[in-house]
Amino acid sequence: MRKPIISRRDLFAGTSALAAGAAFSTYVRGAAPPPTATTPTLIAAAKKEGKVVWYTSVDTKLAQQIGKLFESKYGVPCAVERTGAERLLQRIGQEYSANVHAVDVVNSSDASHLVIWKNKGWLEAYVPEDVAKYYPAEHKDADGMYASFRIFLCVIAYNTNLVKKEEAPKSFKDLLDPKWKGKIVKSHPGYSGATMTATFETARDIGWGYFEALAKQNIMQVQSATDPPKKLALGERAIQADGVEYLIFSEKESGQPVEPVYATEGTPLIVGPNGMFKAAPHPNAARLFQNYCFTPECQQLCINIGGLRSAHPQAKEKPGRTPLSRIKLMKDDPVGVLKSAEEIKAHYVKLFHV
């Protein structure tokens, strides 16, 4: 029998955060627990449990690298289960509705998912030592349920073999020029959590009229926000309307002809939190893995290998990349995304017929 599709609305039923107008970093039920350090006792307990299971929408290559380095460091295997953020939301909802508790730690490119799981009472309050010491308030939940494991941007980009620098778009408005008709690739908010967040921020800041006009540009529609950079590098399209910055970095630094664009209207900011489940089947391994994810070592790996940004002040941006401080950003708002997600998906499908 086919499993039922569980939507955000289904998962959010019975929670009170939306009605109360809760905020990502200020929703308070109680004080966050004291921070927890990595100790020999914790490592031994994690080894005894045998593994940690990480559900994530992080790019597969980076996710597997993190898992391998964690295992080599602590002797605890990390089972990486990677899929798109919206599929991740559905999978966990289906598992929990069937009383199946398979996941230990979760990461989503859509921070509103963590708001949902928190308000369902599924997340464990747990604060890694590095989060307590170094992370700014806007990048950690006040109750200690999650923190910003990764930060990245959803950017316009172009193929430098197909588009001259002086002719490249500099704004979202520029993408509506008739000369780009049939030359643009774009990801889908119904599949990608990053694209959902980017769509919310873009529609909020410059209006749905932009998407209405873009829909007439005969775009190539793909699923994941990781897909447009790949299509761009292959020369299948000259321009990407949205896509993850970290893969543009990866493609460019490996010699592919791609270049990011930071739109004059602002670039959508995506925050991808990590959280740990109360019903985690490997709780000590989950704590150890959560600690590791927020260390400078792991965060630097995310930057250097994954092309991500970090909230950890000891992690350094890679030379040759535009510093985050020099980019005009659109503001993230996970609760706003949560309120609007179903409407965004329906409106998008209506406009783009996909």
Image (cartoon, rainbow, N blue to C red):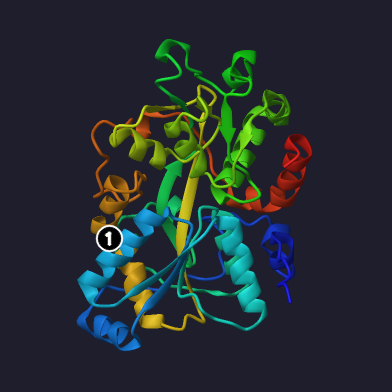
* 79 to the left or right of 196: left
In the rendered image, which residue does mark 1 sit on?
295
Asked whether residue 132 is in view, the answer is no
235 to 20, vertically: above or below? above
Asked whether residue 102 is in view, the answer is yes
* 59 to the left or right of 27: left
Q: Nearer the viewer, residue 350 or 288?
A: 350
Q: Nearer the viewer, residue 22 or 353?
A: 353
Q: Mark 1: which amino acid?
A: Thr
The location of residue 270, given as percent across then percent down, is 49, 45
- Say which quarter of the image contains residue 293: bottom left
The location of residue 191, given as percent across then percent down, is 61, 51
Q: Which element is circle 1 on?
A: loop
The location of residue 344, given as percent across then percent down, is 71, 44
9 to 158, vertically: above or below? below
Q: Residue furthest bottom?
A: 48
* 197 to the left or right of 64: right
115 to 205, vertically: above or below? below
The location of residue 288, given as percent across then percent down, is 32, 74
Q: Quadrant of the C terminus?
A: top right
Q: Tell me what residue is drawn at x 67 percent, y 62 percent.
A: 17
Q: Tell me what residue is drawn at x 47 percent, y 12 percent.
A: 167
Q: Quadrant of the N terminus?
A: bottom right
